[in-house]
Amino acid sequence: MAIINSVLTWLIKKRMHQIDLFLKFPMEVQHDWFEKLIQAGVSTEWGKKYDYASIRSPEIFRQRVPVSRYEDIKPLIDRMRKGEKNLLWPEEIKWFAKSSGTTDNKSKFIPISQSTIEECHFKAGKDVLTLYLNNHPDSSIFQGKGLLMGGSQNIQEVNNQSYFEGDLSAILIHNMPYWAQVMRTPSLSIALMDEWESKLQLMAETTQNHNVTSLSGVPSWTLVLMRKMLELTGKETMTEVWPNLEVFFHGGVSFAPYREQFATLIPDKSMRYFETYNASEGFFGIQDRSDANDMLLMLDYGIYYEFIPVDEAEQAFPHALDLNEVQLNTNYAMVITTNSGLWRYMIGDTIRFTSLSPYRIKITGRTRNFINVVGEELMIDNAEKALATACSKTGAAIRDYTAAPLYLDNTIRHEWLIEFEKMPDNFDFFAELFDNALKALNSDYEAKRYHDLVLKPPLIKSMKKGSFYAWMKRNGRLGGQHKIPRLHNSRDFVDEILKNSNKTKKNFNF
């Protein structure tokens, strides 16, 4: 372990110099990757279709190549899964990350090249440690094990060994180098288990006596594991189980609704929380400061970025901006071109820039995961902040939630299904605080709520504990990478959860 620590320390120092390079020369680094990606795609079917050989600039690229969503390139991906090569990317694609997304029940199969595994995901994994240790040089993280809350989908060998599919986390764990395997827990056989509930039990049983110093995963599923661990051990807090636990690297969903629950289960004041921005399509951002939770946009991972103002995201020909054209505090849909052959691909996330030197971002929501039925343009970022305000002032803690419009008796309002970990002291006050916080955060929402003329007050339904877990289990969504759909213009998710749930405890409408 001492040799590993020495080698890792040397690598971390070396990597900080490389990170400094793209901090000082962001556009040069991005344009260098743009040229590499275009050159790599020249001989592919996609590259020939759009004559990549004659593309000399990002401007020509934007004019010639359309912005794509998954459904646009699905026919090509289906052909790749049948063994065809050189369609989107010149490398042989052996891995496909299976994802249901957050707003669609259909499975998506995101192509993952070996270049993406090494130059993006593995590089990002090292950078998470690099930036964390750069902030905390006194860390003892390498004195113990890192526990990764990976997905529940095992690797599937398909089409006579033509390719493999599974959750991204399972693909990465399967490909991890030896030094990384030594430093993680649980064992590979447990980490790659497909049946989620048995996996949770075995993870708790086999890691309770390990010296776990770090956790990585989606907050909601990490909480499920910790509660299982406390149930199994009879301990009061996770500090008693893993006394040397010092950091939780989290991503996938906003941490705000879960912060108080983590503080209760891990009451150690020195516990640290570091945010990351990773997805099946790529790894995009890492928190680089301890005193701020925005993330450094990582510019040298084989990804070329473009940004579309949110109000243009659904247009047939949206106007995309280069990195040097973005502005602060504006919501953008993120478009990526990657070394797996995703060309001008809209991943569905919306972000805003909190800094332009260096480029730092915050995730604000999804392009199709918001409520906008009367022009209120309610984003997840608004909802998370408003819920946090209402919780802090009423002593509440939220386990999960979702929301959608409700049309009833010629009125329109938002219906919120909330599963509370800790009930608010006063529900009417909670609802009022929540509504007022949304007004303060979102001027469009405030205008539509004026005198209840357009949008009526929100209807909040307190759900029985376990309602969301049961819904996810019924729909095959158990596992570290699956998330509750938060906001949606359609009532599909809300109606299905209500239909299959026991009666709600209480409705609150003021």
Image: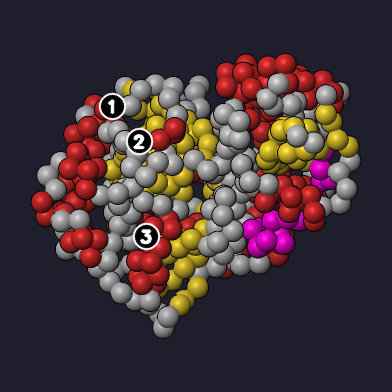
Neighbor class of circle 2 (other Cα within 10 Å; few <14, some 14-19, many 20+) is: many
**CA distance separating discs 1 and 3:** 28 Å
Q: Is residue 473 magenta?
A: yes
Tag 2: amino acid: Phe
Residue highlighted by disc 1: 325
Judge by depth and name the residue closer to the eye, 197 or 99. 99
Residue at 57 percent across and 29 percent down: it is: 375
Taking 44 as reference, is 407 left or right? Answer: right
Marks 2,1: beta carbons within 8 A: yes
Residue highlighted by disc 3: 73
In percent of width and height, residue 255 lies at 60, 35
Residue at 57 percent across and 50 percent down: it is: 103
Tag 3: amino acid: Ile
Taking 473 as reference, is 321 left or right? Answer: left
Q: Secondary structure at mark 2?
A: strand
Residue highlighted by disc 2: 307
Whether residue 510 is visible to the viewer of this picture, yes or no, is: yes
**CA distance separating discs 2 and 1:** 9 Å
Q: Which residues are magenta?
A: 462-478
In percent of width and height, residue 309 lies at 39, 32
